[in-house]
Image (cartoon, helix red, strand yellow):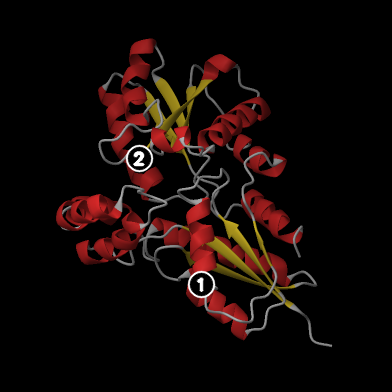
Amino acid sequence: MSQQKIGVLLVNLGTPEHPTAPAIRKFLKPFLADSRVIDYPKFLWKPILYSFILPFRPRKVKPLYQHVWTNEGSPLYANTIGQEKALQAHFDQSEHGVLVRATMAYSKPSISDVVDEFLKEKVAKMIVLPLFPQYSSTTTAAIFDAFAQSLKKKKDIPPFDFIHHYYERPSYIQALAQTIHLQENEHLLFSFHGIPQRYVIEGDYYTEHCQQTAQLIAVAAGLSEEQWQVSYQSRFGSEEWTRPYTDETLIHLPKQGKKKLAVICPGFAADCLETLEEIDITNRKHFMAAGGQAYRYIPALNASPAHIQLLAELISERL
């Protein structure tokens, strides 16, 4: 009797295929056009997007991508493929016929391409694992939309599970807590990707998940309340975003006597432009210029054994 196959979609948002302005524009176009990400009325947002953002922003961020690009592609792509390979190796040792595929909501490999592959393989079930521990309408829900869209014209849809969040899971908390080893007089900053504050007011409970994540990790790492705090990075546009802002916080910390800093970004399952460039390069400069003495970035979990074990647990429970 042939073994039933289970298809796992390991999903991140996406990345340019090359560190060039045209490739960055190709990625940003569907990303910023998604109303899950920017929910302004289309008649207002489209002229801004096509006339002011897409013509200029790709050229602006191109040097940032070039600075962190790897031989395997963008850091996000390389790290997500590394997670796919490690997870596939894990399940190849089990009795389950699991097919793991890394995929992106707004770039290649696309969710629709992977779904088509799984349907051709006649998988008995699909498991969608968004690589976002904290739920947000801008990430988790956007991935759900893309997955649903990929099935819109299909007749042979198998059962599927969609993993909504896993921020409170003990193995996730422990995996991150074990990366924190504060040195003498070192302060810890939890930096999460921000979202517009209006989204929170309208019901997105992402920041609740972020605050709870930081609290759980701090307790697991044995930190006192005075040793850590939370901020939000990567704001875009002129609208008010979730506060406090990471860049502003880093400028104020040395003035408060916190001159030795470690920064961790628990919302990022894989290192990418926002961690390797924004946090480890640009914001390091802000902190040191403001009077900081020491600054270090604690890498994302990426394809570490503890992270692969966590992801494998999330999948195995649904086989």
Left or right: residue 60 versus residue 41 is left
Task: Check disc 1 and give the amino acid type.
Answer: Ser
- Quarter in which the N terminus is drawn: bottom right
**Residue 180 visible, this angle:** no
Mark 1, other Cα within 10 Å: few <14 / some 14–19 / many ≥20:
some
The amino acid at mark 2 is Ser
Q: How far separated are the C-alphas under marks 2 and 1?
A: 29 Å
**Res. 126 image quadrant:** bottom right
Report the number of numbered marks.
2
| 318 to the left or right of 27 | right
| Residue 214 percent coordinates (x, y) | 57, 30
Q: Position of residue 33 (x, y in %)?
A: 32, 57
Residue furthest to the bottom: 1
- Name the residue rendered at 40%, 27% in the picture: 243
Query: Is the residue 319 above or below the residue 279 in the image?
Result: below
Choose mark 2 or mark 1, whichever is in front.
1
In this view of the protein, can residue 314 be seen by the observer?
yes
The image shows residue 231 at horizontal and vertical percentages of 43, 29
Q: Quadrant of residue 176?
A: top right
Taking the spot 40% from the left edge, 63% from the top edge, the residue there is: 106
Q: Residue at x 70, y 43 (%)?
A: 171
Dot 2 falls on a residue whose secondary structure is: loop
**Left or right: where 222 falls relative to 284:** right
**Which label belongs to residue 150?**
1
Give SS at disc 1: helix
Q: Which mark is residue 234?
A: 2
